[in-house]
Structure formats: C-alpha cells, structure tokens
Image (tube, rainbow, N blue to C red):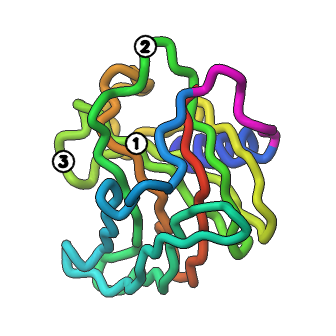
C-alpha cells in the first residue's frame, strides 16, 4: 500500500511540474546517435510476453525516442522499457529528473537504478502521465519509490547508474515519446 501511495504522490508532483529548472544538466536530447546509448528491454528476458520497440525519431526539429508496444502481465510479465546506462552518476546535490514527454494518456514511469539495486527486479520508480502534447515534467528524487524494502528509502544521487522510461505493471498499449532527460 505504501508503494502505491508513493507512486500516486510522484504522479501528482509530476502533474504540477513546469519547465526544467535553470542550471539543469542535460543527460539526453536524443541527437548524435542515441541508439548507441539507449537499449530496449522487455519482460521477455524473464519469460514474459510483452512486445514493443523503441524508435529514434525527429519531428519539427525535435529529436526523441518513442516507446511503443503491448504490455502484458501474462506469464508473470508486465513491462517494456528503453534505458540508458550512465557513464557518470548524477551530480551531488541533484534534486530530481526533468523530462520532456508526450504520449497516449497512459501512466508511465521513470526507473532509476543505483549501486544498491543489485538484483534485476530492484529499482526506484516515479510515475507520470503523458498526454498528446509535449510537456515538461519534473520528478523530484523524493518521489521515486524503491521496489523492495531492502533498498534505502531515498536515492543518493551519486549512486545512480541508469535511467529508464518504462511502460509497466498492467495490460495496456504503450505509446510514449521522450525528447529530453535532464537532472536538476
């Protein structure tokens, strides 16, 4: 129940967000061969049956990744994602992640992995909704809930090792695009 409350709090914080903060550090603007930095992963790695794809596209001068597919909870599955392993952790003192997104109105997640997420099913997640128009969302690190009680309750920015955009946890059609990822 606490995990659901934390996810809902994260979604509420995301809905209140405005443009990214001044002084934010750009992690990704999806230019310059982003396919070499981002990987598509689905629950098929563990026997699930979700199907999808990540495509790197551009429209009206905006480059982005588009994650699409069918998420299925059959056979203990339930996710598709596109993720980037980070060459450096978030800067000390980072407060959150800012993303520019659009989608089909469904709920999606940003997943962060840290040096403490030693199992494939360990991560921190914050929810957001992506409507049809581009929007800037800020997800405070405090809004990221750990997937397991053995993880620290809060994220140390200096330990973040990867970031993922994820369609997760329920049967649905995913269609979400991300044009930028920043740390603030």
Label placed on residue 92: 2
Q: Residue at x 50, y 68 (%)?
A: 167
10 Å crowding of disc 1: few (<14), some (14-19), many (20+): many
- Quote the CA–CA distance across marks 2 and 1: 16 Å
- Quote the CA–CA distance across marks 1 and 3: 13 Å
**Which residue, given by chain and number where applicable, does mark 1 sit on?**
112
**Label located before the other in sequence (2 or 3):** 2
Residue 86 falls in which quadrant of the image?
top left
Single out the mark in the foreground, 1 or 3: 1
Please give the range of residues in magenta.
16-24
Q: Is mark 2 on a helix, strand or loop?
A: loop
- Quote the CA–CA distance across marks 2 and 3: 24 Å
Above or below residue 119? Residue 81 is below
Is residue 158 shown to the viewer in this render? Answer: yes
Above or below residue 108? Residue 153 is above
| Badge 2 vs badge 1, beta-carbon distance below 8 Å | no
Q: What element carries label 3?
A: loop
Q: Residue at x 34, y 37 (%)?
A: 149
**Label located before the other in sequence (1 or 3):** 1
Q: Residue at x 77, y 53 (%)?
A: 135
**Which residue, given by chain and number where applicable, does mark 3 sit on?**
119
Single out the mark in the foreground, 2 or 3: 2
Q: What element carries label 1?
A: strand
Does residue 109 show up magenta in the picture?
no
Single out the mark in the foreground, 2 or 1: 2
Q: Position of residue 25 (x, y in %)?
A: 54, 28
Q: Where is residue 94 in the image (x, y as percent from the top left)?
A: 51, 20
What secondary structure predominates along the stretch shown in magenta? loop
Q: Residue at x 49, y 46 (%)?
A: 28
């Amino acid at each position: 129940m606490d995990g659901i409350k934390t996810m809902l709090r994260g979604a509420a914080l995301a809905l209140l967000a405005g443009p990214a903060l001044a002084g934010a550090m750009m992690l990704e603007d999806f230019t310059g061969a982003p396919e070499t930095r981002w990987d598509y992963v689905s629950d098929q790695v563990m026997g699930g049956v979700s199907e999808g794809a990540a495509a790197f596209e551009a429209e009206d001068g905006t480059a982005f990744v588009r994650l699409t597919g069918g998420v299925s909870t059959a056979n203990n599955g339930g996710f598709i994602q596109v993720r980037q392993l980070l060459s450096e952790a978030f800067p000390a003192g980072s407060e959150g992640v800012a993303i520019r997104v659009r989608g089909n109105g469904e709920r999606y997640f940003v997943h962060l992995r840290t040096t403490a997420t030693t199992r494939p099913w360990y991560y921190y997640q914050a929810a957001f909704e992506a409507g049809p128009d581009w929007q800037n969302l800020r997800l405070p690190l405090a809004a990221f809930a750990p997937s397991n009680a053995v993880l620290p309750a809060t994220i140390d920015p200096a330990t973040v090792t990867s970031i993922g955009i994820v369609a997760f946890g329920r049967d649905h059609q995913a269609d979400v695009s991300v044009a930028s990822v920043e740390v603030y």
